[in-house]
Image (tube, rainbow, N blue to C red):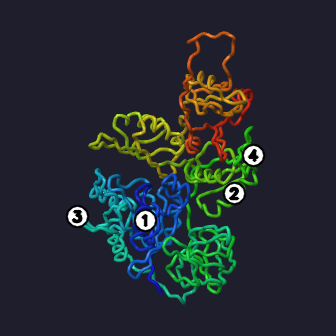
Amino acid sequence: MEKIINIAVVAHVDAGKSTLVDALLSQNGVFGSNEDVVECVMDSNDIERERGITIYSKNCSIRYKDYKINIVDTPGHADFSSEVERIMKTVDTVILLVDAAEGPMPQTRFVLNKALEQNLKPILFINKIDKKDARPEAVVDMTFDLFMELGANDEQLDFPIVYGIARDGVAKLSLDDKNGDISVLLDTVLSKCSAYEGNENDPLQLQVSSLDYDSFIGRLGVGRVTKGAIKNGQTVALANNDGSISSFRISKLFVEEGIKRVEKDIAYYGDIVTFSGCPDISIGDTVCDKDHIEPMKPIIIEKPTLSMDFLVNSSPFAGKDKSSKFLTSRHIRDRLEKELETNVGLEVEELEGNDGYKVSGRGELHLSILLENMRREGYELSVSKPEVLYQDVDGIKCEPFEKVIVNCPSTYSGTIINDLQERKALLQSMSNDENDYTHMEFIAPTRGLIGYRSAFITNTKGEGIMVRSFDSYKPYVGEITGRKNGVLVSMENGKTLGFSLWNLQDRGTLIVGPAEEVYIGMIVGIHNRDNDLNVNPCKNKQLTNTRASGSDEAIALIKPKVFSLEEALEFIADDELVEVTPGAIRLRKKILDPNERFRQNRK
């Protein structure tokens, strides 16, 4: 029997979780000397690599001394917090990473609170102590205060502290130590956390904490064996979340060895396993011995806070993208149903009277990652502006609020405070550092923050940092000022011409370049004023027989603004849509006909 300890690495985004996991894997013989190892090896998804973020929780394992240590790498972004919530029951402790300069951030509070709720005893890892502005002692005090705020008990408050540089694979118990590897962290785990105890003859009990999918063997359940042992080919009972009981046969059984999934005939209590055989399994279901059914408490996943409408693309360009494969409502429905199998933070409802679906998630990034995956797979659709989801709390209409932390040069702080107060944000604290940077903390309604990021970047000249994380539901704060600029809307079908765009530059910022196909109702620019303006981007210069040297002005076009998917979703207004295809992201009005839009606005 193996001695098994399961740990999760949790932190705010960019604190160094995946880098620490790299160090744990590389220093414990997972990679051969001839292997070419990429950075953040656990971030295997294409979008994770491109953006440098972790989106999905993933398992791996190492062998240290006579222990098998299963490691769960978790996302740091608040939009993917459902990935963190569901794995807390599968681990014995968490390694809480905190940046030695930044200190605890909004998501640090969330992940720590989830760990404390499961009565886990976290190990604090102060990372990036080599930063020139590092302040590890002050950060330890700040983290202790956070433990106190979250109601940690005496045992949890007595947390061990490890200092280190995850990038270099270094961990030490004090800042003066000369240790050159990561072993100190693993020794701390072994000293503070005993191996999982049990009896292989106990009746099987396993709760599904994660789902996966394999194109050959179908849906996969992932969870920790809390009692007994699980065998390949064994017939087991499944206690569903709704109280029903069914049975199925384990057709494949896997455990993690390093970063590889290895097939096994049997796995014992304490280990994290992946199994197939049940196409209807879902998060929170309990797999039991068929003669001893003992369901575990359900895993509670917090509800979504934001929704968008996913609609069939109805623009004149629908289906014209050569890479488009899936365009119909049925295609979109099937893809969303497949996503629901593994993405537990998502909810989908069919829209009444519309060819589409209301999709709800944890935030704009959560939903935009789904959209990005869909467009890469060949889906084409239109998406509405994100809307917050309200809740009724004791008869009072409430909306989601977020904790917002801003660091920016002090010269811009007044502008930022004014902007956020217009969006009904409340300033909670403010301080200056020796580098003339201002640190501000706000509580702001999510509604007010939609579309604010681009204005923040502009107002801080790209030097500011803004971090957001869901805080709580609070009473509705009334109307909030929306986008301050109107848009330039094409009133012609055709190809844009340089001459016409050159004349439109004075009217606003263009988002299309020359020789691009446009249609009536498509947004081609951002107006300098607050109203929408119908324009003709396809008008050519009038040709005459008269020629005079020097009378023709040279056309010099400013480079158009290019929206990313997240920026487009943030930018659009209630009467606009984002047209998402494999090859393009376009902005358009919901009602394409300018005369019909005029009539609707008059009403």
Counting residues from the N terminus, which is met first, the one under dot 3 or under dot 2? Answer: 3
* 245 vs 124, nearest the viewer: 124
Residue 452 is at least partly visible in this image: yes
Q: Which residue is mark 1?
A: 22
- Choose mark 1 or mark 4, whichever is in front: 1
Q: Amino acid at mark 2?
A: Arg
Counting residues from the N terminus, which is met first, the one under dot 1 or under dot 2? Answer: 1
> How far separated are the C-alphas under marks 3 and 2?
54 Å
Q: Amino acid at mark 4?
A: Asn
**How dense is the environment of label 2, judged by Cα within 10 Å: few (below 14), some, or many (20 and up)?**
some
> How far separated are the C-alphas under marks 1 and 4?
47 Å
Counting residues from the N terminus, which is met first, the one under dot 3 or under dot 4? Answer: 3
The x and y percentages for residue 482 are: 55, 35
Q: How many marks?
A: 4
> How far separated are the C-alphas under marks 4 and 2?
18 Å
Secondary element under disc 2, as helix, strand or loop, is helix
Q: Residue at x 58, y 41 (%)?
A: 568
**How dense is the environment of label 1, judged by Cα within 10 Å: few (below 14), some, or many (20 and up)?**
many
Is the Cβ of the residue at disc 3 closer than 8 Å to that at disc 4? no
Q: Which residue is mark 3?
A: 176
The x and y percentages for residue 520 are: 71, 31
Q: Which residue is mark 4?
A: 354
Q: Quadrant of the C terminus?
A: top right
Residue 277, image quadrant: bottom right
Q: Amino acid at mark 1?
A: Asp
Q: Is residue 553 above or below residue 27?
A: above
Q: Which residue is mark 2?
A: 335
